[in-house]
Image (cartoon, rainbow, N blue to C red):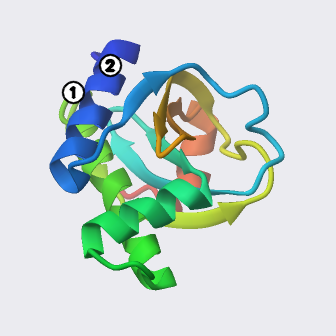
Amino acid sequence: MSINEDILREVTQTAWQAMLGIPLESSGAPTNADGEAHIVSQVNIHGAWDGTILIRWTPTVAHHAARVLYQSETPSAEEVRDVVGEMANIVGGNLKGLLPGPSWLSLPIVQHSEGGDTTNGVAIHEAWFECAGEPVGVRVVELPPEGRKQNYGLEETS
């Protein structure tokens, strides 16, 4: 695998700048991230490598990003979902290109969460940032071999 924390940071910051044109500064993990309400956007990668790319947003950052992208003081809930989903799609697509192939990228999934990470894999890389004074986390999770088919709903074919 050709991803490390530096590459994860670079890919995320490049995607953020290209899509939103606003600063995303590197930072450390927040001390109180678990248990707080947040939005998670993710894409799954399936193929020679199976895993998930997750972006953890505070509602403040997600709304700020939607205000910037849509140039609206009051973006709709759908616009917020679109922004966070598309960012996961861009970051995931760029990281997919660094992984062994062939592989496929899922459509983005956006969900609200009150707790910590609930994926069934092992976090192999994580990077934290700050935008608009709030934390943004990006995590690369590798799925264990036994969790791959269940997670993607795939059936074996002969």
Q: Is residue 116 above or below residue 151?
A: above
Contact, mark 1 vs mark 2 (Cβ under 8 Å): yes
Name the residue carrying label 2: 3
Name the residue carrying label 1: 98
Q: Is residue 28 above or below residue 53?
A: above
Q: What is the spatial separation of the Cα atoms under label 1 and label 2, in whole angstroms? A: 7 Å
Q: Amino acid at mark 1?
A: Leu
Left or right of 130 on screen, residue 66: left
Quadrant for the C terminus, please.
Answer: bottom left
Quadrant for the N terminus, please.
Answer: top left
Q: Nearer the viewer, residue 107 or 137?
A: 137
Per the image, label 2 sits on a secondary structure element best described as loop
Image position, residue 152 (x, y; %): 50, 57
Image position, residue 155 (x, y; %): 48, 60
Which residue is located at x 49 percent, y 60 percent?
62
Is residue 2 in sight in this rendering? yes
Is residue 4 in sight in this rendering? no
Q: Amino acid at mark 2?
A: Ile
